[in-house]
Structures are given as structure tokens and as C-alpha cells.
Image: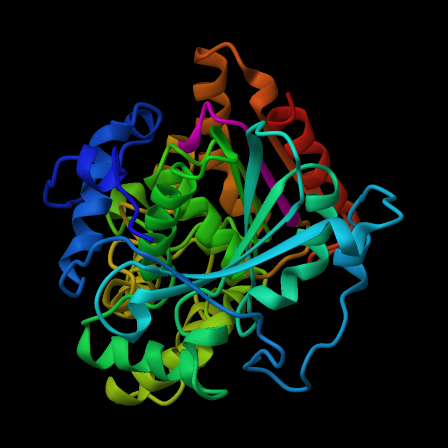
Amino acid sequence: MLVRNVGSILQMQSAQPYGRVSKNRNKIMAIDAHNLRSQFLHLLRTRRTPQVPLCVIPGKPVNDPLYQEFPKPIFSEVMASCPKEDIPNMKELLQEQNFYLTTEEGEQGLLPFLVLSMKETNKKKRPAIVFLHSTNKCKEWLRPLLQAYASRGYIAVAIDSRYHGERATNVTTYRDALISSWKKGDTMPFIYDTVWDLIKLADYLTEREDIDSSRIGIIGESLGGMHAWFAAFADTRYSVVVPIIGVQERVADISIGDLVMRLQGFRWAIEHDRWQGRVDSIKDVFEEACSDLGKNEIDKEVVEKYKKLTSHDNIHQTDFYLTLIRIHEQVWDRIAPGLASQFDSPYTVPVIAPRPLLILNGEEDPRCPIAGLDIPTSSVRKACADADCLLNFKVIAQAGIGHQMTPLMVNEASNWFDKFLKV
């Protein structure tokens, strides 16, 4: 099946070189969304293999999905808590479709995705939601959520992100891809390459006769939450957005004059021993980078250096922050250019507004410190206020919860989608 690819966001946006955006907080509040999005799409194109027609190839159910973690996960009570309709003959009415979508040349350019929906006799268009898994899992892991949403009238879609699920060959595929990206700089397996796939997926979903193209939501957990955030930033066809334990602020500016304002979240993470969370999710690539840079324990070294500084020693504090930032930026800018600067959350999250956006985090999450969300959330609130739709934005930081998805988050996300996608 050849998708016409009419109106693709990649065709609609002009190709402009990406560069630094303003480091001034007032200018953050007035981001040029079109220009920033164009810069990001241009970046995505710079590491792409030759383009191919967007085609859909029939697939088959995966009976033994690959998980890149031990022990292999079996069942999620959290996802099973998702609200569902009580349909006696659910198994007979539930329709499953498995496809592959060609997004570019090469093995990773074949996007496996799963679609669950209820069999319908009428031709009414329905809302669709794209679900995105966390690190080392796969689309099959999300089946309880897909079934629950399908029972409530949604067309539920899940993909395997890059180097996961059917796109992986062994339990170290994703790890190996990250290290290769650090060494060669020719791919962007951390977030960006999957965002490319999600843009192409939107091309396909908007062409389906059973989907209302104006009602396509996106949700993800952890790494999937970051995928949802960046896909919605890059592509406005994702109209309702719910990143779960995914939105965080990286290391952005290194201007001495901006340290006090722009590094509050990062400084907070250091001072409260939360610095490990910044790299734990992709620890292997940071360890490889440390080795390549001739340092065995960069994080321990710089943290110990910080602890020796006095609160009044501003010059040495500045040196410390700049050193720490530059070390981490070398990694981030290699595997995901701009993630720690112009495409960090203070710039890209506000671009999602005024589309409905629900951010779900744990109050004690070391990877997504709440203190680091002050600037992006205030910018989103302003954008929604300017558009007279303050109810389109909500942040929930669940008390006593670290980096984990909870039944409360699952139910809040369900209510959010029902509120904005159900007619």
C-alpha cells in the first residue's frame, strides 16, 4: 500500500539551518514556533538515509517479543488499571492489525506498528492515539492499554521505537546503537530518529479512512514520554499530548550571566544528589564517552569538586557548572544535537501549546526533577492564557513517586484524552 503523503509536515516546513535560540528568559516566552520547528526538522534530515516512498506492508503478530532487560517483564498491573468498557464478546469484536511502514532506507527504516480497534459496521471516523513504550520494551508490552482504549472507541496504535522490539536483534541492540552514535555521529537513536518515524506515521494515520485526522493523540512513558513530547513539538497533527515521566530539562546555556536563571534545574539536581538521573537511562553511552575522553568517573569527579566549593565562591562555582555542562553536552550534542540547548524543554515544550498538554511526573523522580520544569511550564501557561484556553494545560507531580508510571497517571491520561478527543 502506497501512502500519498499529501501535506506531510516534512514538506510543509522550510529547511532552515538550526542554531542557538535566545538565552533570554523573556525571549523564551516569545519563541518563534515555526522557525524552531523548521530548525529541528532540518536537523532530522541531516542524518537520514535516502528517502523512499511511504509504503505500508502487512505484518504478523509477534508471539515472542524481544525485551532488552532482565528479568523479562510479564504483566503490568499499572496498565491493566486503565479504564475499559465491559464488553462480553470483546475478543470477537477486537480487531488487530500489524503493519510495517517504510520511513527511510535501511533496516531501521522499517517501522513496525500494531493497531487495535473495535470492529465497526458504520463508516464513522474515530479518534486515534499513538502509544510509545519505555526503554528496552516494545509495542507488545503496551497491549493492555491498547485494548482498554480500543474498547472505548479509540483506534489504538503502538510502535517499536528505533532499535527496540522487532527492530532489535539481541538484548544489547539499543545500547550498541547509542555507543555507535557517540563514536560515529551518523545516527540519532536517542529520541530523534524515532521522532522521524512518528512524523511519517502521522502521514499514514491522517490518510486512514477510519481515523479523524483532527483527533490524533500521543502518549508515552519515560523514553516514550520524550518521544511523545518531541513528536508533538515537531508535528502539529498530534493534537492532544500526554508525556508520562518524560519531560525534563537538560543542560542548556553556558553563558555565565545566564547561569543563575537557566541552570536552576540542573544545579538543583547536583545539590540534591539527583545528578545520576540525568544519565542513568543511557548510562552505557556515558561510560563509553568517559573512557574515550580519558576519564573513568567524570560524574564522581565533578560532583566531589562541587562539594568542596563554598556557597560564596561564585567564580569557582561558575567554573564547576561550565565544566560539568561541557562534559555532558559533548555526549548530548553527539547523540541528540541541541537536546541540551536550543531543543531543551524550555524551548520545545511551549511550542506544543495551545494544544491540550498533560504532563505527568513523579514528585521524587531523579530523572525528571520538578524544579527543572519551572520555565517550560510557565511558558506553556502563558501561551495557553494568550490563546484563552488555560484548561488545555495541566501538570501533575504525584507525591512520593519516583521514576515510575502509576495507576493514577494512567487514569489521569485516560480522562484527558476523553475530555479532548471524544466528540
The answer to whether 135 appears left or right of 194 in the picture is right
Q: Is residue 225 one of those drawn in magenta?
A: no
Residue 31 in sight from this viewpoint: yes
Q: Position of residue 274 (x, y in %)?
A: 56, 64
Q: Is residue 283 above or below residue 381?
A: below
Q: Is residue 357 one of those drawn in magenta?
A: yes
Q: Residue at x 47, y 28 (%)?
A: 380
Q: Which residues are magenta?
A: 352-361
The answer to whether 33 appears left or right of 223 in the picture is left
Q: Is residue 115 above or below residue 288?
A: above
Q: Nearer the viewer, residue 102 or 348?
A: 102
Quadrant of res 188:
bottom left
Q: Position of residue 91 (x, y in %)?
A: 78, 56
Q: Position of residue 23 (x, y in %)?
A: 26, 38
Residue 398 in sight from this viewpoint: no
Q: Is residue 383 above or below residue 125?
A: above
Q: Is residue 409 above or below residue 235?
A: below
The answer to whether 147 appears left or right of 138 in the picture is right
Q: Residue at x 27, y 53 (%)?
A: 54
The answer to whether 67 appears left or right of 93 in the picture is left
Q: Position of residue 383 (x, y in %)?
A: 43, 20
Q: Quadrant of the C terminus?
A: top right
Q: Residue at x 69, y 56 (%)?
A: 405
Q: Nearer the viewer, residue 357 or 100?
A: 100
